[in-house]
Amino acid sequence: MTRAIVLATCLATLLAACGGNEVVRPTVNVSIGQQLIDLKRARDAGALSAREYEYQRKRLIESVE
């Protein structure tokens, strides 16, 4: 019985340590200008629709403001 309680406590502790609220964002080494150029190229190549392009372009610009 004691062994089961110790095991359950250890498992609960390990699982609690896995959860966290911290959001890790990757560091971007590409300038906003280059990202806009890449986005336009993707649209021109047909990888993005005009609607998707506008949405992503606005998101990119808003991320700087």
Image: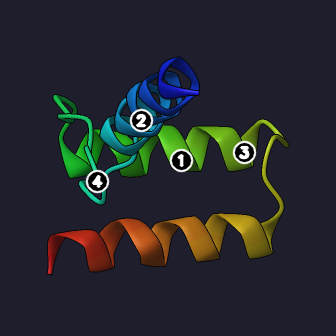
Between disc 2 and disc 4, whose residue precedes? Answer: 2
Residue 49 pos. (x, y %): 83, 61
Q: Secondary structure at mark 2?
A: helix
| Mark 1 or mark 3, earlier in chain | 1
Three-letter amino acid code of the residue under disc 2? Thr
The 10 Å Cα crowd at callout 4, few under 14, some 14 to 19, many 20 or more, is: few
Q: Residue at x 24, y 54 (%)?
A: 22
Residue at image point 48% right, 26% down: 2
Tell me the SS state at disc 3. helix
Q: Residues within 10 Å of mark 2 (few under 14, many from 20)?
A: few
36 lies above or below 34? below
* Left or right for 19, reference 40: left
* Mark in the foreground, 3 or 2: 2
Identity, as a three-letter code, of the amino acid under mark 4: Val
Viewer-proximal residue, 64 or 3? 3
Estimate the x, y position of residue 65 in percent, counting from the top left: 14, 81
For the residues bearing labels 1 and 3, Cβ distance under 8 angstroms: no
Q: Earlier in the sequence, mark 2 or mark 1?
A: 2
Which label lies toward us, 4 or 1?
4
Q: Are discs 3 and 4 less than 8 Å apart at CB?
A: no
Residue behind mark 4: 23
Amino acid type at mark 3:
Asp
Disc 1 on helix, strand or loop?
helix
Q: Residue at x 17, y 70 (%)?
A: 64
Labels 3 and 2: the sequence-earlier one: 2
Q: How far is mark 1 from mark 3, CA to CA? A: 9 Å
- Give the label, 3 or 4, closer to the camera: 4
Give the spatial CA distance, label 3 vs label 2: 57 Å
Residue at the disc numbered 3: 44
Q: Are marks 2 and 4 in contact (CB under 8 Å)?
A: no
**Distance of label 2 from label 1 (alpha carbons):** 50 Å
Identify the amino acid type marked 1.
Answer: Leu
